[in-house]
Image (cartoon, coloured by chain):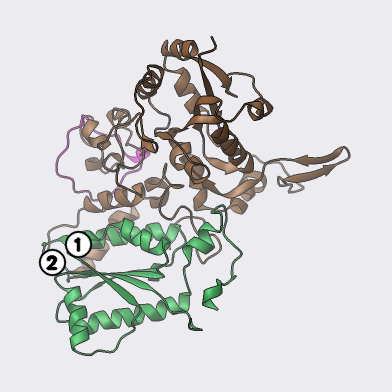
Chain colours: A brown, B green
Amino acid sequence: MADKGKFAMYWAASCGGCEIAVLNIGEKILDVDANFDIVFWPCAADFKYKDVEGYPDGYIDLCLFNGAIRTSENEEMAHLLRQKSKILVAFGSCAYEGCIPALANLTSKEAIFRTAYLESPSTENPDGVLPQPVTQVPEGELHIPEFYETVKSLDQVVSVDYYIPGCPPEPHQIIAVLDAIIQGAELPPPGSIIGAGTVAVCEECPLEKHEKAIKRIYRPYEKRPEPGICLLEQGIICLGPATRSGCGARCPQVGMGCRGCYGPLDGVEDQGAKFLSAIASVIDVGEPGGEEADLDREIEAVMESLADPAGTFYRFSMAHSLLRRARVNGSGDGEGGTA
Amino acid sequence: MSDTYEPVIVGFLCNWCSYRAADLAGTSRLHYAPNMRPIRVMCSARVDPQFVLKALREGADGVLIAGCHPGECHYVEGNIKALRRYKLLQRLLAQFGIEPERVQIVWASASEGNVLAEAVDRMVEQLRALGPLRWQETVLGGDGHGPVEAGEPAAEEV
């Protein structure tokens, strides 16, 4: 059994869905077991950080790292696993580009703590105690990880060999990647995005598409989508045009607009900006040649129906976007909303 | 190094109207603020919102998009597309805490060198009042994990 590869999987700031996605590959998980020794996988096997520290550098052949970098613990583990792994994969949208945890970049650490520990209706905290990195107790000093102001993607902290996008990655994509590694296929150049397509989600999406011109934007609860017709055409936000394929367009097919979890297409740095272009292009401003003031008003009226543009366009890609976070110490209120 | 803050404006000027307006401003010897770095694009619709975000992140204090008046676009409706993007971008930027004055759109035809010059002058004054943006330092911070202390001026600006 000495020639088995060493497999590790770690979760930083994540929901655990990526672990489930790996377990969800069905009987293929037996191939993983047959070909790899699990040497670290907090969700599935009992190893300690100390065990990983004891491994020689490069001991782990394949490490799937999911989750964004939110705390000092996440960052330490990223450095440790980078040092111990031959192939480090940013697995899933959080590790790749921040995903939902990185939406916290639209606000501040202070505001997050205020909501979580002081103001939310279910919070009982009369003394207003907030988490402290260091606490003195009679027995000595207690340390907990530091909560960072800004959520980062894995590659903003350590170098990453491959990216597997998705929230979570689709089982068939995970199988394809694992199979390739198990069979010793030639690996793509480092930095590649694997386990995904190269075209937009729209190209995989079977919904019927016509000319798009929308007068208002509906939130999911406001409209029951008409089956078989492109959602964007119906005024329902769908990030398909600005999102990498590979998922099989599963969400739009059941009436849920694409949220963009497979990230931007090749050559695009900022998925949100690209989607902004796409949505701006489908806004109906009537016949050309109208008055400028009318034009302004019409555009504004449609925009008014779009709640939270930043949260919508950057739902999965905030940490990897061009601006990366909102300004909290400037004149912005850091609370979102419009000026 | 001057003692006063000079705003940097990245200007995207459309080939058919606004770049010619800038030319006209030059040949007419109009005096206006030299703070704009003009970039010629074929149409204001060519201005990908990514360009604007990148300019702001990489050190511009403001971005000016200039194109033909609505109804006069060389590509019929390119400027309307630019306008729609601009309106949405303004909402997005507000959520990031970026003041609306930092990104502006102006229509200046080939004969309106003065309109372009006035827009630049006005924008420079507005940016002067707002102060520098310095996104890399003040928002992304040294290690990117948090902003540096507010009000701490960068060495080259004092």
Kind of residue at disc 1 = Ile
| Mark pair 2, 1: CA separation | 9 Å
Residue A179 seen from this side: yes
**Residue behind mark 1:** B80
**Residue behind mark 2:** B73
Residue A34 location, x and y as percent?
A: 48, 10
Q: Residue at x 38, y 79 (%)?
A: B124
Decide if residue B8 is on the left or right side of residue A149.
Answer: left
Q: Residue at x 48, y 22 (%)?
A: A20
- Which quadrant: the N terminus of chain A? top right
Q: Is residue A24 magenta?
A: no
Residue A107 location, x and y as percent?
A: 53, 53
Dominant SS in magenta: loop
Camera-side residue: A320 or A220?
A320
- Write down the quadrant of residue A220 in the picture: top left
Q: Is residue B39 above or below residue A177?
A: below
Specify the segment rendered in magenta: A206-228
Q: Are marks 2 and 1 in contact (CB under 8 Å)?
A: yes
